[in-house]
Amino acid sequence: MIDPSEKKDRVRIARKYKFDDYVLDPDQHSLMRSGTLVSIEPKVFDLLLILVKNAGELISRDTLIDLVWQGRIVSDSAISACVAAVRRAVGDNGESQSIIRTVARRGFLCCADVEIVEAASPASPRALSPRLQFTKNREGKSLAYTVAGDGPPIIYTTFGGTSIEADWSSPFFRPLFDAICAKNTLVRFDEIGSGHSDLDMNSAGVEAIALDLLCVADALGIDQFGLFCQSGSALSAAYLAAHYPDRVVSMVLNGGYAEGRNVRKDTTGTQEMFGMISEAWDKPESSFLLAYSLLYFPEGPLDLAKDIVEIMHKSCPAENILRMRESHNDASVVELLPKVQCPTLIVHARDDSIHPLSQARKLAAGIVDSELLVLDSANHVPMPNSLDWDAFLDATLSFLNASTDHFES
């Protein structure tokens, strides 16, 4: 039986670290100096946090590699560059070393006086995901979808195994969903083959996903809508906008591409990736999931990257994810791009190694009057609290909200 005293005033402890003029906040993933936000990359933040949390304690090079780089092989120059970036962030330098000190051949330590500030705050209740609803696609398969928020409809899609119920509680997805729901009706659905939709796949591919999206819109009585699409779902978005210009009023394509790997003859690592999925997708203890997440999100934060991949592998059987990947590797929408008439914003990371920036340029060159926003990142899509997150969110929401004028009354 639960003690009544435990039911009231459940709290969590928010911990911050103060040193000199700085405040390091792990929850917000932020560094403030005299009330001003300091720009700091995720990996640099992680290294600084380790040193500050263990102020006065020598942290060896091997320990830093284990904690910051997850045990991967890292060159001395890469470690030195990261330490130098930490020093710049806190106004230190290699000569004075007043905050971060290097102990030759032994490691590093934070020599500042660090004050831990703790504050109790009510524990955030776990929000229930929107109720699942179901409709049938053209093949009679069951499609699961959810609706949240209020305002002009935005249909969100991503690629590679989804769970519209699980990702509502994900620290990666939820901030984006909440931001869109503030002024729009957010519609999401699980592709056939994943999540709560029918796992039995008769067909997989760009056209099938596009037509399934239309089935969801029709079930809701939505004649016109905006699209927010990430990664490979940009292919289906382009197909839909080209074939149904009266339905799609605007698009944001994030991390998308115009040609699959096989079409653009960029198959480096493809067979190895397929082999790893076949062998390790259903083995959560396998290091494959960690490696998979780092391919897409090399800048982290690692916990968010692992969360995304975990949702994917739990919601989509290995044979389905392989079929999805294979169909998209063979796809191209280049010839359809000139037929896209709606306002389109293309957002892409400059150093995305999964689908290069050249593919974003190809989308922008093919879609008349489209806009391209390039983010200084190597992550496939932006992460909440990363340096590019605010710019990405502001641009996306401004573009989507401006598109409301395009809806027919």
Image (cartoon, rainbow, N blue to C red):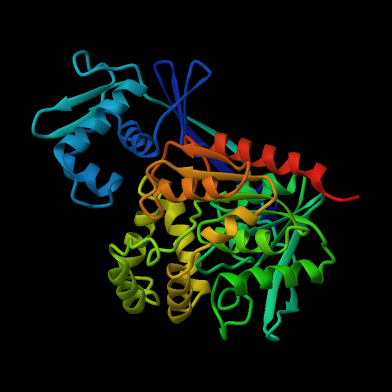
Q: Position of residue 249 (x, y in %)?
A: 74, 51
Q: Is residue 199 visible?
A: yes
- Which residue sits at x=91%, y=50%? 409
Residue 207 appears in which quarter of the rendering? bottom right
Identify whether 239 is placed above or below 120. below
Q: Position of residue 181 (x, y in %)?
A: 73, 49
Q: Position of residue 353 (x, y in %)?
A: 35, 51
Identify whether 51 is placed above or below 295. above
- Which residue sits at x=62%, y=60%? 237
Left or right, 319 with respect to 207, comes to: left
Identify whether 55 is placed above or below 332. above
The quarter in which the N terminus is drawn is bottom right
Residue 368 appears in which quarter of the rendering? top right
In the image, farthest residue toward the left: 105
Left or right, 82 with respect to 368, comes to: left
Q: Nearer the viewer, residue 236 or 51?
A: 236
Q: Nearer the viewer, residue 343 or 368?
A: 368
Identify whether 117 is placed above or below 175. above
